[in-house]
């Protein structure tokens, strides 16, 4: 299932991307030289929805490449979509969990899912369900190996996140079996 057209990220203007890539290099160089890079950061922030801290420019390369860092910066702010339907959220979740989109799109859509189900901590459900449930024994055996039978389906992930957030999306199925109780401490 593809991400619905109305939810797809708009393409990034290549000229803006190139400008931001060069700006990223310049900010890194000034910071490495011990400068504050204030004017360059101001130019950078004119194109981003959030302010980036100087340390982000010095450390992003530890986890992502420059292209992803710049694309992430140019992604729009994830906002609550009052008209969101369950099938649309499921399509986005499937794209994220099946890695059907780029890394910067996964970053955006993961944050977007969090915005749709505030307090649902859907990213923990996807990547660290043992943390979400505060019980590693549900997902790993005594040796620490993952229990394949404990893997949550995307429908289950959405059902748990909706339960925690208190937001039930229109069109959500009523019959999703939740194998574990919803934790009350989260």
Image (cartoon, grey):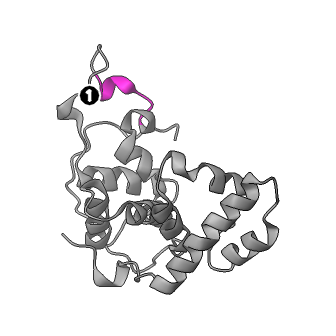
Circle 1: element type? loop
Lateral position of residue 73 relative to residue 88, left or right: right
Q: Quadrant of residue 6?
A: bottom left
Asked if residue 139 is positioned above or below residue 151 in the image, the reply reads above
Lateral position of residue 68 relative to residue 30, left or right: left
Q: Which residues are magenta?
A: 133-140
Residue displayed at 25% across by 71% down? 87
Lateral position of residue 139 relative to residue 31, left or right: left
Residue displayed at 32% across by 56% down? 158
Image location of residue 105, percent across then percent down: 39, 66
Say which residue label 1 marks.
146
Quadrant where the N terminus is found in the figure: bottom left
Q: Main secondary structure of the magenta part?
A: loop
The one of 55 and 87 positioned closer to us in this rendering: 55
Asked if residue 12 is positioned above or below residue 94 in the image, the reply reads below
Asked if residue 33 is positioned above or below residue 51 in the image, the reply reads above
Q: Quadrant of residue 12?
A: bottom left
- Can the viewer see residue 52? no
Local crowd size for mark 1, using a 10 Å CA cut-off: few (<14), some (14–19), many (≥20)? some
Q: Quadrant of residue 146?
A: top left
Residue displayed at 45% across by 78% down? 82
Residue 179 inside the magenta-drawn segment: no
The one of 9 and 130 positioned closer to us in this rendering: 9
Image location of residue 41, percent across then percent down: 73, 69
Image location of residue 80, percent across then percent down: 50, 73
- Can the viewer see residue 108? yes
The one of 126 and 46 positioned closer to us in this rendering: 46
Image location of residue 155, percent across then percent down: 24, 55
């Amino acid at each position: 299932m593809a991400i619905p057209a109305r939810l797809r990220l708009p393409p990034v203007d290549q000229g803006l991307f190139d400008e931001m890539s060069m700006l990223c290099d310049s900010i890194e160089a000034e910071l490495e030289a011990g400068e504050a890079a204030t004017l360059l950061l101001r130019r950078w922030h004119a194109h981003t929805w959030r302010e980036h801290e100087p340390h982000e420019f010095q450390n992003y390369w530890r986890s992502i490449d420059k292209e992803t860092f710049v694309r992430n910066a140019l992604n729009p702010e994830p906002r609550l979509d009052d008209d969101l339907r369950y099938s649309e959220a499921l399509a986005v979740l499937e794209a994220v969990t099946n890695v059907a989109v780029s890394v910067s799109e996964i970053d955006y859509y993961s944050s977007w899912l969090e915005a749709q189900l505030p307090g649902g901590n859907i990213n923990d459900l996807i990547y660290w369900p043992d943390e979400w449930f505060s019980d590693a024994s549900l997902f790993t055996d005594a040796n620490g190996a993952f229990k394949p039978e404990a893997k949550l389906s995307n429908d289950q992930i959405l059902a748990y996140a909706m339960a925690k957030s208190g937001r039930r999306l229109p069109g959500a199925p009523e019959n999703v079996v939740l194998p574990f109780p919803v934790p009350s401490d989260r």
